[in-house]
Image (cartoon, rainbow, N blue to C red):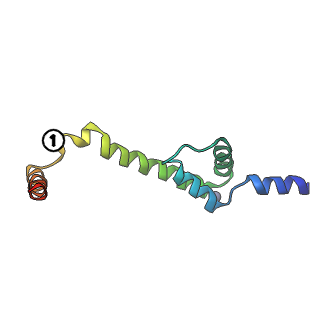
Amino acid sequence: MKMFNKLMAKIMLSCVQATKLSAVKNYRKLGFVEKMQLKMHLFVCSNCKAFHKQGHQIEEAVHQFLFDEKYLSEKHLSEEKKSKIQNTVDQELN
Ligand SMILES: [Zn+2]
């Protein structure tokens, strides 16, 4: 039983390690072992599971805001904001 506990201690991540992997997952692909460790931790830890879910939602919202045509359309910015942006760009270029 001690061997099993030692093995589990090596495999199971702490909450700090799990949240780091959860954040890193948005910027690089996790390795097989990292994926399994994170999945196992998220299976047993509701706090990290909530953090992971919220991080994923934030990442999706940011991605949608930056790249979704709906948010990039001219309708989204008022004429006043467009004018301010254009003036700022013109000033920086001249
Ligand atoms: Zn945790």
Secondary element type, mark 1: helix
Comparing 34 with 90, the one in front is 90
Q: Determine the residue located farthest toward the bottom in the rendered image.
A: 16
The x, y position of residue 23, in whole percent, is: 52, 54
Percent from the top left, x then y, of residue 70?
Answer: 25, 38
User: Which quadrant of the picture is home to ligand 1?
Assistant: bottom right
Q: Which residue is drawn at 63% across and 50% down?
A: 42
- x, y percentage for residue 85? 13, 54
Give the residue drawn at x 89%, y 54%: 3
The answer to which of 67 and 50 lies nearer the viewer is 67
In the depicted structure, whether residue 64 falls above or below residue 9: above
User: Which residue lies most toward the front here?
Assistant: 94
Residue at 52 percent across and 46 percent down: it is 28
Q: Which residue lies furthest to the right in this view?
A: 1
Residue, disc 1: 74
- Report the label total: 1
Which residue shows up at 48% across the image and 48% down it?
A: 27
Pointer 1 residue Cβ closer than 8 Å to ligand 1: no
Report x, y in % for residue 20: 57, 57
Task: Say which of 6 and 53 sits in front.
Answer: 6
Q: Residue lying furthest top in this view?
A: 69
Of 26 and 90, the residue lying toward us: 90
Q: In this view, does 58 lie to the left or right of 15?
A: left
Q: Quadrant of the N terminus?
A: bottom right
Give the crowd class for mark 1: few <14, some 14-19, many >=20 residues within 10 Å: few
Quarter of the image that includes the C terminus: bottom left
- What's the residue type where badge 1 is placed? Glu
Left/right of residue 49 with respect to residue 41 in the rendered view: left
Q: In this view, does 22 lie to the left or right of 14?
A: left
